[in-house]
């Protein structure tokens, strides 16, 4: 494993990660917007081999897996972020092959050769001087099955749907990540097996969750997550829109995490990612602490325990 990964004190990679902070704060706003992809004639893919080790970056509110592919002018950067335990990754791919003219739309990606191709919403941005695609956080190694999609569609508001976890064998079977539309020419990143890199990312996430004061082992066998007692859409009112930002018609998306006590009452609010000024962060946390209430998480024995809840608030003017 030591030959595959670098540590977070790597100076060059630290500089690279610092460059992405302003970018990550800008794309989330558009992640839910769907547009028609740009058509492109089928071509032989550009194949990029790895030109760096995998790097796992430990941050206060997220874990990041990073690797560079290719050399010279034909390079790509792959970022896979997690804000908590999940099979879903918030992905970013940067390189000169990304078309600058396409602001947002739907991209075709595949963790090949076994998994099916999936369509993911994206928004464009830059990392340093490189154009980049940022995908929504609903990016798994494999898309949900037809049965899982049906269960999600038919579920009640308070029902918790468990998707089949991505097995170690399927992570190991990954050989590449292929990106088709909206690229002018498909690009294949030769990732190799993702079992080891994802295991390292998961260890980072376990440390992250433990730093929140959560019992990581008990959370692996929960019989119920912390569930809202009322609709999260009612937690933030139009009157909570920061007045200065409202006058400027300033939109924003704020990702937050609530610490939830065994009684279901929030004990703390933490901003995990934000697109805009601190006024929005303050408005979100003030509203959450005032109005959000939960049925507490339950352990394997059905006993309530301290847990957390993650979501986001989208401020926009129609």
Image: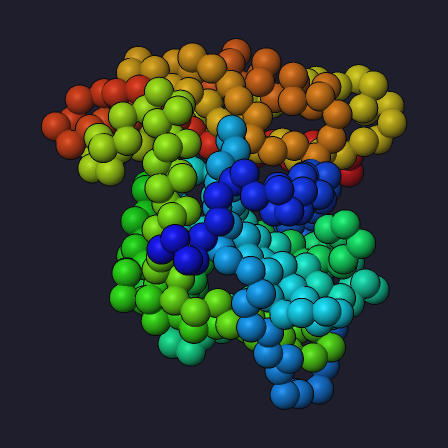
Q: At 66% from the left edge and 73% from the top edge, which residue is drawn?
A: 181
Q: Image quadrant of residue 156?
A: top left
Seen from the viewer's position, the closer of residues 26 and 32 is 26
The image's colouring method is rainbow
201 versus 187 height, above or below: above
224 versus 203 height, above or below: above
Q: At 76% from the left edge and 34% from the top edge, which residue is drawn?
A: 251
Q: At 47% from the left edge and 15% from the top edge, which residue is drawn?
A: 268
Q: Is residue 90 left or right of residue 143?
A: right
Q: Image quadrant of residue 93?
A: bottom right
The C terminus, quarter of image: top right
Q: Is residue 109 left or right of residue 163?
A: right
Residue 308, x across and y down, in percent: 39, 26
Residue 35, x across and y down, in percent: 71, 62
Residue 156 seen in render = no
Seen from the viewer's position, the closer of residues 312 and 141 is 141
């Amino acid at each position: 494993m030591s030959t595959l990964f670098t540590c977070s004190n790597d100076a060059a990679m630290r500089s690279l990660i610092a460059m992405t902070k302003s970018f990550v704060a800008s794309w989330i706003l558009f992640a839910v917007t769907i547009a028609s992809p740009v058509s492109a004639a089928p071509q032989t893919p550009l194949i990029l081999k790895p030109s760096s080790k995998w790097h796992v970056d430990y941050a206060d509110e997220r874990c990041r897996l990073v690797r560079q592919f290719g050399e010279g002018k034909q390079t790509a950067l792959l970022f896979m972020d997690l804000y908590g335990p999940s099979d879903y990754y918030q992905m970013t791919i940067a390189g000169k092959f990304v078309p600058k003219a396409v602001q947002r739309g739907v991209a075709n990606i595949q963790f090949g050769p076994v998994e099916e191709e999936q369509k993911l919403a994206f928004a464009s941005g830059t990392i340093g001087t490189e154009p980049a695609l940022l995908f929504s956080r609903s990016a798994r190694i494999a898309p949900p099955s037809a049965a899982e999609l049906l269960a999600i569609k038919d579920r009640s508001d308070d029902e918790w749907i468990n998707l089949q976890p991505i097995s170690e064998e399927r992570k190991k079977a990954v050989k590449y990540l292929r990106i088709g539309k909206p690229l002018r020419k498909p690009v294949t990143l030769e990732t190799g097996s993702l079992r080891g890199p994802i295991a390292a990312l998961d260890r980072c996430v376990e440390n992250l969750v433990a730093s929140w004061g959560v019992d990581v082992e008990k959370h692996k066998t929960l019989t119920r997550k912390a569930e809202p007692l009322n609709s999260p859409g009612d937690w933030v009112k139009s009157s909570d829109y920061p007045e200065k930002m409202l006058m400027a018609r300033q939109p924003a998306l704020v990702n937050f995490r609530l610490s939830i006590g065994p009684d279901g009452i929030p004990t703390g609010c933490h901003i995990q990612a934000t697109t805009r000024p601190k006024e929005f962060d303050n408005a979100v946390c003030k509203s959450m602490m005032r109005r959000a209430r939960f049925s507490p998480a339950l352990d394997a024995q059905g006993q309530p325990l301290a847990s957390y809840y993650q979501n986001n608030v989208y401020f926009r003017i129609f």
